[in-house]
Amino acid sequence: MDGLINWFENLAGSFADAVYMTLINNDQYNLLLQGLVKSLTLTFFAALIGIALGLLLAIAKLQDVNNLTGNPFVVWLRKMVTGFANGYISVIRGTPAVVQMLVIYFILYLRILNNIPLFAGMSDVAIASIAFGINSSAYVAEVIRAGIMAVDKGQTEAGRSLGLSGRQTMQYIVIPQAVKNVLPALGNEFIVLLKETSVAGYIGIADLTKAAQSIGSVTYNYIVPLLCAAYVYFLMTTVLSTGMGMLERRLRKSD
Amino acid sequence: MIEVQNLHKYFGELEVLKGIDVHISKGECVCVIGPSGGGKSTFLRCINLLEMPTKGDIIIEGISVMQNLRQIDKLRQKVGMVFQQFNLFPHMTVLRNITLAPTKLKKMPQAEANELAMELLNKVGLADKAQEYPTRLSGGQKQRVAIARAMAMDPDVLLFDEPTSALDPEMVGEVLEVMKQLAKNNATMVVVTHEMGFAREVGDKIIFIDGGIITEQGTPAEIFGHPQHARTREFLSKVL
C-alpha cells in the first residue's frame, strides 16, 4: 500500500516538475501562446483567401459551358476559365498541403517572387496563409458548388422570369439559400484548415505545434507541451464547431 | 400583342414543339389545354425564354425576342410568370418576395414598393401575411403570393404554368378566383391548365396542343361545344 501511495506521490511530483520545467520556467508558456496566435492568424487569413478564391472557382465551374451564346471570344474565354478551374481543383486536391506549401515557399517565393521588389521580404506567415488559402479554396469551391446546385432550379427560373439578370439572381436568390446548405461542410473545412496549419513549422513558422516541439527539445520533455498543444487544438475546433452550429440554427429561422 | 411564329423546340433529338403559331391579343385570356407531354408547358416556357426555342420567333409588342437576346432581361420584365411549384423565395418574407424585383429592376424606393406590394396582397386577399415567410403559408396562399409577385412588375402578359396542379383540391378555388379577377380586369394571360371549368368560363380562346402542334384552337364554345378533331374529342371526353 505504501508503495502505491509513494508511486502516486512520485508521479504527481514529477508531473508537477515537468509542468514547471516545460511551461512555467522562463515563461515558456509564452511560446505556446505566441504559437497559438500564429496558428489562428494562419487559419483566419487562409480561410478568407479560401472563401474568396473558392467562390470564384465555384462560379467558374458552374458555368454551363455547352450552352454559351454571344461573342465567340468571350465564349472561348469562359470555357478557358472553366477548364482552368477544373485543372486547378484537380491538382490542389490531388497533392498534399505540405508539399504545396513547400513548393510555394521554396520555389515560388524564394526563387522567384523574392527577386521582385514588390514581393521581396514578405513575412513567412503571409506566404503560408496564401499557401493554405490556395489549398483550402479547392475544397471550398466544391463545397460551394454543391451548395449552389442544391438550390432548386425553380428558384433561378423564378428570378429570371421576373427580369433579374443571372448575376442578380445569384446574388439575391441563389447564394443566400446556398449559404445555408454550405455552412455545415464549410465549418468542417475550417476545422480541417486549423489542424492543417500545424505543418507550418516546415517553413520555419513557430506555430502552436512547432512551439510545443521546441519546448520539448529544450527541456527534454515532450509529453506536457505536446499534450498541451493537442488540447488547445481540440479546444479551438470545439469553439469553431459550436460557433458554426449556432450560426446554422440562426439561419434556419425562416424554415 | 404577342405573336408566336413557327416555334420549334428540340430537347436533344426529341422534337417537342413542331411549329406553333399563336396570336395573343391585349386583354385576352388564352387557355392552353392538352394531354401531358404534349408540349404545353414547353410552349409557355419558350415565350419568356426559360426554354430557348430551336427555331421560330416570338414577337412581344412588335419586338422580336430572338433578335434581341441581349435584352432578354428587359423583355422578361414585361412577361410575368406563375409556376406550378410556386417558386417563392423561402429566405424572404412575403413582402420582400414581391418587392425584390421592383426595387432592384425599376429602382423603386422600398417604401413605394411596399405600398404597391400591400395593394397587390390586398387584391389576392393576403395583406395579413405580408411579414410571414413562405414556409408558413398553405399552397393556395403561396400561389396567390406568387401571382402578386409576378404582377408587381406590371407585366404586359402573365404566363401561368399549371398554377393549380400542385395544390390540394380545396385550395384550387381560391387561386382560380384570383385569376378570374385578373381576367375580368382585362389582364393578358396565357394559362396552361387542366381546369377545364376555368378554361371554359374564363378563357377567351382555347388552344389544344398535342404532339407538339396546335391541333385545334377557337372560342370555348367551339372547342368544348363542337370540337372538330377526333383527338380533341377524345381528350375532352376523358377529362370532362
Image: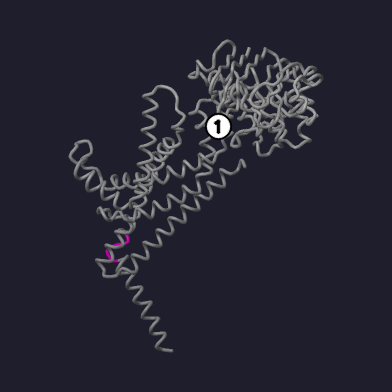
Q: Is residue B115 visible?
A: no
The amino acid at mark 1 is Thr
- Whole-percent x, y for residue B9 in the image: 57, 25
Residue picked out by circle 1:
A156
Task: Name the residue rendered at 39%, 44% in the picture.
Answer: A138
- Whole-percent x, y for residue A158 in the image: 59, 29
Residue farthest along the left direction in this orientation: A115
- Whole-percent x, y for residue A42 in the image: 34, 48
Crowd class of label 1 (few under 14; some 14 to 19; many from 20; radius 10 Å): many
Q: Which quadrant holds the C terminus of chain A?
A: top right
Viewer-side residue, B225 vs A87: B225
Q: Is residue B58 visible?
A: yes
Q: Is residue A26 magenta?
A: yes
Q: Which quadrant holds the N terminus of chain A?
A: bottom left
**What secondary structure predominates along the stretch shown in magenta?**
helix
The magenta region covers: A25-29
Q: Is residue A236 magenta?
A: no
Determine the image quadrant of residue A69: top left
Seen in the image, is B54 located left or right of residue A8?
A: right
Q: Give the vertical position of A74 relative to A106 (above or below).
A: above
Viewer-side residue, B213 vs B65: B213
Seen in the image, is A237 located left or right of residue A112?
A: right
Viewer-side residue, B214 vs A23: B214
Task: Name the residue rendered at 69%, 29% in the picture.
Answer: B162
Determine the image quadrant of residue A75: top left
Determine the image quadrant of residue A152: top right
